[in-house]
Amino acid sequence: MSDAKRDFIDLAEHDPAYLKHLLDLTGRVKSGGARGRPLAGRCLAMIFRKSSTRTRVSTEAGMAQLGGHAIMISDGDSQIGRGESVGDTARVLSRYVDAILIRTFGHDEVVELAREASVPVINGLTDLLHPCQVLADLFTATEEFGGDVSALRVAWIGDGNNMANSWLNAASRLGFSLRLSSPDGYGPDAEILARAQSSTEVAIVETPAEAAEDAHVVTTDVWASMGQEDEQSAREIAFAGYQVDAEVMARAHPAGIFLHCLPAHRGEEVAAEVIDGPRSRIFREAENRLHVIKAILLDLIG
Ligand code: CP
Ligand code: NVA
């Protein structure tokens, strides 16, 4: 690994100035600032070991719009699925492409890929983290409430999953307030929580309504993430009472918005009247995945 190489794997690894720079760059990209073909001749390998709509299509479209090219690799059509090691894959791909985006199960696999690759590695979601999504969510919040991220109050309701952990990491670096409400046994990663609590105002509260109190952003995610499909029925029981419904949204700041990374299950983690209602910003949030990944790509390989 070269010293100069920068990866985008974990928001907690980046200093606040860098994260703010990415948010600013996203704004410039969104308002048409990335003209010409700044990534002409650049290639990105995209390893998807889990399903994706937004991450895959926004990244592939983003590379094309910037003049570059993206190559999709999955288990079924590469040697990864037949057991070729992460290290060999990283070293080989580094000789063909300028960066690698990976979506997989174990977070360690991404860390190892980044260690062995000589090109930047982008985390497109692991069981532990989903940093590109939370950067897009933060950008969506700044569009609504202005650029001072540290002034935000965010409510996380439901599973302490990859999204919750990434919100904690973002809060620990950018200093905004975060309140989480999860069923017993489904809280966020203990180490990530402790680190965030040592650096900013993070509270674990009993009920979704308490979490949502005066929040600018109320957000949630599915009860069973990819890889947890066989836990769906048990989780439906454990998460009863953790739906973001109109009553929960009524507790939020008067201008508070609802975000969801999608895909969503209406009637489970969120009521249809909320996700399809006037305070929902889910499609702008999904669109912002495109502008965010373009900013990350421009920063890493532009
Ligand atoms: N939000 C998100 O990452 O969506 P996909 O799973 O469709 O990529
Ligand atoms: N927590 C969800 C996010 C999907 C974008 C999952 O990991 O399946």
Image: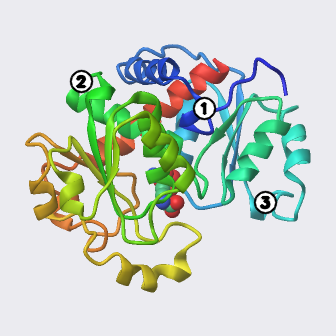
* Residue 53 visible somewhere in the drawing: no
* Residue 100 visible somewhere in the drawing: yes
Query: Which amino acid type is marked by label 1?
Result: Glu
Labelled pair 3, 1 in contact (Cβ < 8 Å): no
Question: Which residue in the rendered view is the most extreme toward the front?
Answer: 198
Label 3: element kind: helix
Quadrant occupied by the N terminus: top right
Residue 109 x %, y %: 75, 52
* Relative side of 4 to 92, left or right: left
Residue 284 x %, y %: 30, 41
Q: Does label 1 point to a residue whose CB lies under 8 Å from ligand 1? A: no
Label 1: element kind: helix
Residue receiving disc 2: 146
Q: Residues within 10 Å of mark 2 (few under 14, many from 20)?
A: few
Q: Rounded to the nearest whole Å, what is the CA distance between mark 3 and mark 1?
A: 32 Å
Residue receiving disc 1: 13
Q: Residue at x 74, y 44 (%)?
A: 111
Q: Is residue 272 above or below residue 200?
A: below
Query: Which amino acid type is marked by label 3?
Result: Asp
Numbered label attached to residue 280: none
Labelled pair 1, 2 in contact (Cβ < 8 Å): no
Q: Which mark is first along the chain, 1 or 3?
A: 1
Number of callouts: 3
Q: Rounded to the nearest whole Å, what is the CA distance between mark 1 and mark 2?
A: 24 Å
